[in-house]
Image (cartoon, rainbow, N blue to C red):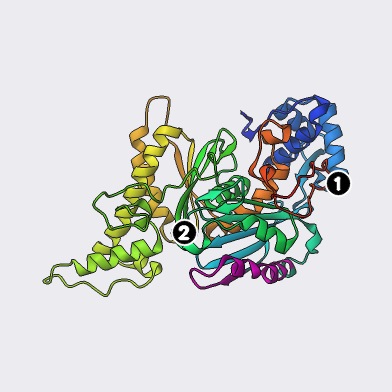
Amino acid sequence: MALAGGRRTERGTNLGRVKDFNEVVVLDLVRAGGPIGRPAIAAATGLTLQTVSNIVGRLLAAGVVLEGSRDGPGRARRELRVNHDAAFALGIQLVRTRLAVGVVDLAGTIRGAADSGFAAGEAPAAVVERLEALVAQAVGKAGIDQDRLLGAGFGAPGPLDLRSGRTLNLLNPPAWSDFAWRRAVADVLGVRVIMDNDATAAALGEKWAGVAARAQSFIYVYLGTGLGAGLFLQGQAYRGVRGNAGEIAHMTAQPDGPPCECGRRGCLGLYLTPDGLLREARRVALEAPSNQPIDRPPATLAELVASRGERYLAVLDRAGALLAGAVREMSRVLDPELIALGGPLVPFVGSRFAAALTGSLRQLDESGAPPPRVAVSGLGSDAGVIGAATLVLHDLFAPTPHKLGLTGSPSDLAPGGRRPVAAPGLPRRRELEPAR
């Protein structure tokens, strides 16, 4: 993939046997770079103008793209843009005490949402039972018929086994270990379900509709009730063998730090979650010298961020420095072009942590090889839901190798849904047997 005239380009092919791949190449270019004309699409993809016109005709007939005129020098130019109402997917985000659902359109915008809290450690089957009502609420707010949903994306905390759609040995809550979430969700909703690590899902959301839209290799750091990283390398999400690449929460940050639930000490995740930041704030309050009284420790993350106390601000700076050190070393290995910070904590600490990362990454600066840039996501607390939905949108509408049958995707290995879904106007994907 290359850049031409500032636009992201994806090379297509004129071979008829991969007509569907060419269609998603063109659609992805229109979606991410539109409005755009046919000649520009041909130049960006390497397809002939006739092939582009044929593809555009099919996409227009399906209602996936729209065409309009733009005045300029000489005659008006015909340009294409994506029809945001052409496709909808369901995004489901699971965290330890909350289940959130959203209906997301082709632009990556949430059109209707609903969520429900529950007790920590609630049985997974009971959590899944909440889904049907939440989906009905979200679909009602979106104002669409539920049959228009192309499928559901399910973002879950790791570690996972994506082949079987299960969570593995979760430390918290342990009751969720070895539960077949994908199959359970598919049984309740009756649609094809794609399950992925929540940080990887959020990274795909950022690629689809956020600050990473033009990046081909980036590290996405998810800051929420837990800590994780999504890896997007050379135009593809990198998941590892079972889907657990990017599990950075248990990297050792301080060998003499507090004990972690994993059995080790000083894990990175202990310092970069709301609970961890508030714990550190309480610690510095207790350790303050008696002749230097300190105010009551902050009770919420908002209070901590708004505090003017030097000790409390030092807690944030220390957390940012620990994250920056970990990301810097990941960048040495992966050599990304971008570091994206996202998740519910970003509105509170995003700019502060971004500054710490930018400073730390300067150590990688070499002549002709600048360090990766740092960007703060604008998706905020919606990142998980949007990311989960884009698991479906990306699988159907983004030009990825598995559409050529070159590799398998997690959804191809064991879809678990009862109703295969095809993208509107595009060839129907092969039906797959439900996971056993």
Residue 153, quarter of the rendered image = bottom right
Q: Is residue 398 left or right of residue 173?
A: right
Magenta range is 115-139
Residue sitting nearer the eye, 87 or 84? 87
- Residue 436 in percent (x, y) is at 69, 50
Residue sitting nearer the eye, 42 or 387? 387
Q: Residue at x 82, y 39 (%)?
A: 78
Q: Is residue 351 visible?
A: yes
Residue sitting nearer the eye, 174 or 278? 174
SS of the residue at dot 2?
loop
Spatial separation of the CA atoms under disc 2 and disc 1: 39 Å
- Residue 411 in percent (x, y) is at 67, 45
State the residue position of label 1: 62
- Residue 19 in percent (x, y) is at 81, 32
Under mark 2, the amino acid is Gly
State the residue position of label 2: 224
Q: Is residue 159 left or right of residue 195?
A: left
Q: Is residue 109 visible?
A: no
Instruction: Name the residue at the front extreme.
Output: 436
Residue 144, quarter of the rendered image = bottom right
Sort mark 2 into few (<14), some (14-19) or many (20+) by Cα contacts within 10 Å: many
Q: Residue at x 66, y 67 (%)?
A: 131
- Residue 260 in percent (x, y) is at 34, 57
